[in-house]
Structure formats: C-alpha cells, structure tokens
Amino acid sequence: MKGRGWILGLALSFACGGEPAPKGGVGGADGGAEDSGGAGEGGADTGPCAEVPLVNYNNFGHSFVLHTCQGCHASTAADRYGAPEDSTFDTVEQVWAQRDRVLARAAAEPPTMPPAGGSSEDDRVRLRWWLECAEEGT
C-alpha cells in the first residue's frame, strides 16, 4: 500500500505541481473533461490538472466526507467534539465553501483532521485532486 500512495503522490505532484488549479478544472458534473485554463479554444488541455483522474463528489467526495468528516461535522452529529458550528459538511456546497480550510487541514502532510487520524495517504491525494482540480461544486 505504501508504494501505491507514493505513486498517487508523485502523480499529484507532477500533475498539479503542488499548486491549486484554476476553478473549472477536470471533470464536470457530466463526467467529461473541461478546460482547466491550460489551452486555447480547441487546443489540448495542458493545465496543471490535465493528467489528474476525474475525482468529484459522486465518485469520491461524498464517501470521504461521510466517513472521515461527518462524525463531527454533520449538522446531526450527536457530539461535534468541539467542531466549529460554521464547519458543517452536510452538502457538497458546504464542503466547497470551505475548500481552502478542508485542504489545509485534511489534505496537509501531516493532516490535522480528523484529529485522531483515519484518512489514508491515497485518500488525501484524492481529496486534493477533487478540491483542486474538479469543477467547483461537483
């Protein structure tokens, strides 16, 4: 598993160069690739997320947020364990509204969220792909 995480990390490093992608990156709601600002009209996409696999709320984000975040960050959580009231992730829109905050805590190395650990290196890479490369809101 460690080797696989390294490969995903290398792919993220290569594809995104450690820089957030412009809004409207890879993969719209219809699953098709969208221009990430790398090429002119009709040209090949050469933006920083051009080689990143399609990762969005439907194929990754929902499950990640449900299993990794909503124990404390759901509006219905019995005990939020100190999670701020303004950090509720019941919808994809709520996650995207706090995109930078989520990336800084849950996708960091080492991550500070969730506080007891739990997210794998591979999932942190996918989280970055989703919130840095997907079309906002997807």
Image (cartoon, helix red, strand yellow):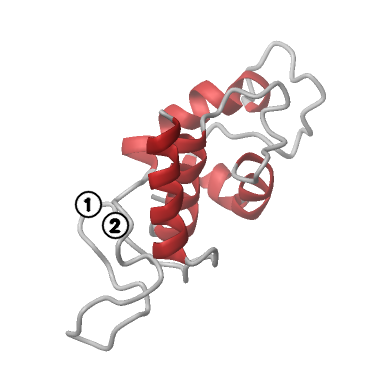
Residue 134 is situated, as x and y percent measured from the top left of the image, at 39, 56
Residue 70 is situated, as x and y percent measured from the top left of the image, at 59, 24
- The crowd level at tag 2 (other Cα within 10 Å; few <14, some 14-19, many 20+) is many
Taking the view exactly as shown, the residue that stands out farthest to the top is: 78
In the rendering, which numbered label is found on residue 48? Answer: none
Write the residue at 52% across / 40% down: 124
Residue 40 is situated, as x and y percent measured from the top left of the image, at 27, 88
Write the residue at 42% across / 32% down: 62
Kind of residue at disc 2: Gly
Local SS, label 1:
loop
Name the one closer to the observer, 100 or 47: 47
Q: Which image quarter holds the N terminus?
A: top left
Left or right: 92 with respect to 50? right
- The crowd level at tag 1 (other Cα within 10 Å; few <14, some 14-19, many 20+) is few
Write the residue at 19% across / 84% down: 43
Let me know if residue 136 appears in the view: no
Name the one closer to the observer, 44 or 138: 44
Disc 2 designates what residue? 27
Disc 2 to disc 1: CB gap under 8 Å: yes
Local SS, label 2:
loop
Write the residue at 50% across / 50% down: 128
Let me know if residue 8 appears in the view: yes
Above-or-below relation of 90 to 76: below
Measure how far apart labels 2 and 1 are at the Cα level: 5 Å
Name the one closer to the observer, 21 or 80: 21
Above-or-below relation of 78 to 62: above
Disc 1 designates what residue? 31
Kind of residue at disc 1: Gly
Taking the view exactly as shown, the residue that stands out farthest to the bottom is: 40
Taking the view exactly as shown, the residue that stands out farthest to the left is: 42
Residue 123 is situated, as x and y percent measured from the top left of the image, at 47, 35
Above-or-below relation of 102 to 88: below
